[in-house]
Amino acid sequence: MPAKPAPIKKKLVKKVEKAPAPAPEPEAAPAPDPEPAPEPSPVVEAPPAESAAPAEGAPADAEAVAPAEDATPAVEGEATAAPPAEAAEAPEPEEPKAPSPPPPPPKEPTSAPLDLFVEDKNDTSVTIIWSQPEVIGPSGLDGYTVEVCQDGTEDWKASNDDLQKSCRYIIKNQTTGDRLKIRVVAVNAGGRSPPVTLPEAVVVKDVADRPKVRLPRFLRQRYVANVGDKINLTIPFIGKPKPVVSWTKNGQPLEKGRVNIRSTERDSIIFIRVAERDDSGVYEMSVKVEDFEDKATLTLQIVELPGPPASVKIVDTWGFNVALEWTPPKDNGNTEITGYTVQKADKKTGDWFTVMEHYHRLNATISDLVMGNTYKFRVFSENKCGISEEAGVTKDEAKIVKTGIEYKAPEYQQHDFSEAPKFTTSLANRATTVGYSTKLLCSVRGYPKPKIEWLKNQMVIGDDPKFRQICVQGICSLEIRKPVSFDGGVYTCRAKNNHGEVMVSCKLEVRQPVVGEAGKK
């Protein structure tokens, strides 16, 4: 019946919205007239939110739900449809998956290394260097393999067991004279790169460089040192292989012990611990490589202070001037004399004063001397080390006198001071008490000095210890110690010299003490 499917489709859509739960599957019943299967286009037009089923299953679902609503028998074409419960469930939306990575690029080797050449070589090894490949690629660079073979063969063998990381390699343990072909290959995950090969075979042999002595600038002229200095000079040189170094002094081999030589691959050192004048001379250094040789010379001069001039003498004296002459010293200190120093000294004071310094001649005129003084002169020698320790001194003296005038001292008659003794102060009479010491005083003059004597009652007292006699500067005194009555009398002082004699006297009275005073005592 062609008009029936339209309302069934409308009801089916509403039923699906109201009852999502599955319905029991009805029994299959024979249909009198088979109906054509509904077109899928109306079911596809259902809202996508209600059903996410594919378009092909939509007609089957509609016909399966219809018997549950109207109990309409199913047609034969619907017997092969899926169960209504499974069709009623909406499938869950699938989670978005990450995009799959692109396939890895193919592994490729690098390009060939660049700029391979020999850096150095000797009798047993060859040093090569190169640059990394221009194109490395995504696989990177793991290292390099260095391969060698004998010239004339193609038997390449790796020289390094492990990959070489740097761009420099030393091929060791080779035989002197071998001719080697050398190549370098870059290696990575993609395999080996094309090799880079030296254009010519390499002979394993030390390269002979012509030797050359590089004498320092300050040694190209005469090298001067003082006696006692330490000499330590370094002379560099070049040459390959290591040059053979030899030294001579004045054409003769060096004296062992005095001069020490130490040579390395690059320089040679001459060492003298304590320099002496005998170490002076021309030293020659020779460096030799095979048939090539180079030489250099240095002049060593050991100097010291000079000796004094051989002789210094006064040639002439006039007015206020003195002319001197001297001869060079016998020992110049192993170097030339650069000058002289002249000094003078006054005989009265003996102090030396410099009148000329750095004087180059062997004669000099000393002027502006003081009239009436007597002078001596001395001369020192000078060289590069300094002034001599000793000086040459003139044997004679130079006395400066005024020309045409000679001083004569006047003659005076010597005054006669002779005089007979004379008392300028006489003795005075005195009185004293028993037991009290007393003095008698007088003064006298005369030339020559008169001799003084004391007398008591015309008797010479002499060295009696009771009396003390003193005469100083013409003052004469006589001390009478604790006199008694017996010591009273006339005392006389007598002065006598070659021109005469004089006397002066006085009277001494010794009194007894008063009775009252005696009682007090």
Image: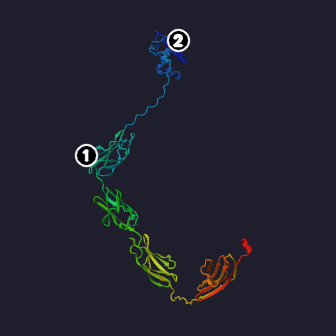
- When the figure is inspected, residue 137 is found, relative to residue 39, above or below; the finding is below
Residue 78 x, y percent position in the rendering = 46, 14
Q: Where's residue 115, x and y in %?
A: 35, 49
Q: Nearer the viewer, residue 181 or 489?
A: 489
The residue drawn where x is 25% and y is 45% is 153
User: Residue at position x 50%, y 24% from top?
Assistant: 93
Residue 215 visible in the displayed image: yes
Give the crowd class for mark 2: few <14, some 14-19, many >=20 residues within 10 Å. few
Identify the image quadrant of the C terminus: bottom right
Separation of disc 2 and disc 1 at Cα? 101 Å
Residue at (46, 20) in percent of width and height: 56
Sequence-wise, the earlier of marks 2 and 1 is: 2
What amino acid is found at the position of numbered circle 2 in the picture? Asp
Q: Nearer the viewer, residue 166 or 361?
A: 361
Q: Quadrant of residue 240?
A: bottom left
Find residue 373 and report its horizontal and vertical position in percent: 51, 82
Residue 153: give its label.
1
For residue 105, which quarter of the picture? top left
Can the viewer see residue 116? no
Q: Check disc 1 and give the amino acid type.
A: Thr
Height in image: 437 above or below 36? below
Measured as percent of width and height from the top left, residue 87 is found at 48, 18
Q: Which residue is mark 2?
A: 70
**19 versus 398 height, above or below:** above
Label 2: which secondary element: helix
How packed mark 1 is, by other alpha carbons closer than 10 Å (few <14, some 14-19, many 20 or more), is few
The residue located at (52%, 78%) in the rendering is: 349
